[in-house]
Image: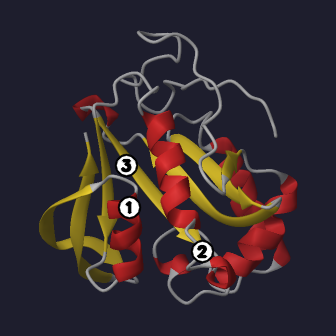
Amino acid sequence: MVQFSVTISSRMDPTVPSASDKNGPMTEPTAHGSVVLREFTEADVRLALELGEDPYIPLIGSLPARPTRREAEEWVRRQRSRQAEGRGFPFVIVADETAVGTIGLWLRKLSEGIGIVGYSISPRHRRRGYATDALKAITEFAWTVPGVERIELYIEPWNRGSFRAAEKAGYRYERSLPAHHEIGGIPKDMLLYVST
């Protein structure tokens, strides 16, 4: 497992505290159940190519649909730079030494005390409990980030697997948000799940 220490850069957002504020230095996210969260590496280009084949995942993030190898490499590089830019903490979800998905804690609402979690599991690794375990691991990690008082997770109403994973990870449904996220150029309703 890669050992690293977390620092939050304030270059993007001057309200983002340094990692040593309040709680002292943070360490890597905890493993939970069948998964370990780790930093992105160059080897994760294969995972990016796999995720880009899914019809939905490219609609909700910056990964192009059916990426070329070069596009996948650029996407991995962007993920690796997110922490230094002060945007958040992207991780690869690993099970049995295989990269099975990604998860991130995003800080764009940190000035309001809110961390936002988002994740994706490769289609060939779904329905094995990895999302639930990864959510539990990143939630434990999120509580070590200075300023995080609430964690939000946005899920489309049709995505039963994701809201079941959220509930199993201890998140509770708070409310429906009409036309809250634009996905594929279309405003979509979202279910808001929270951990407090």
Please identify the residue farthest to the right as the structure is shown: 43
Q: Earlier in the sequence, mark 1 or mark 3?
A: 3
Residue that mark 3 sits on: 116
- Residue ID at (68%, 24%): 5
Amino acid, disc 2: Arg
* Helix, strand or loop for disc 3: strand
Q: How far apart are marks 2 and 1 (CA)?
A: 13 Å
Q: Which mark is residue 168?
A: 1
Quadrant into which the C terminus falls: top left
Q: Residue 151 carries which label?
A: none
Q: Is residue 152 depicted above or below 58 in this figure?
A: above
- Asked where in the image residue 109 lies, by quadrant, the reply is top left
Determine contact: label 2, label 1, CB under 8 Å. Answer: no
* Helix, strand or loop for disc 2: loop
Q: Earlier in the sequence, mark 3 or mark 2?
A: 3
Using the image as rendered, state which of residue 195 and residue 24 is in the foreground.
195
Residue that mark 2 sits on: 128
Where does the image place residue 145, in percent across and percent down from the top left? 45, 27
Specify few, some or many for label 2: CA neighbours under 10 Å numbering under 14, 14-19, or 20 or more.
few
Q: Nearer the viewer, mark 1 or mark 3?
A: 1
Please identify the residue farthest to the front as the structure is shown: 33
- Residue ID at (34%, 81%): 160
> In the picture provided, is 31 more to the left or to the right than 1?
left
Specify few, some or many for label 3: CA neighbours under 10 Å numbering under 14, 14-19, or 20 or more.
many
Using the image as rendered, state which of residue 168 and residue 70 is in the foreground.
168
Q: How far apart are marks 3 and 2 (CA)?
A: 23 Å
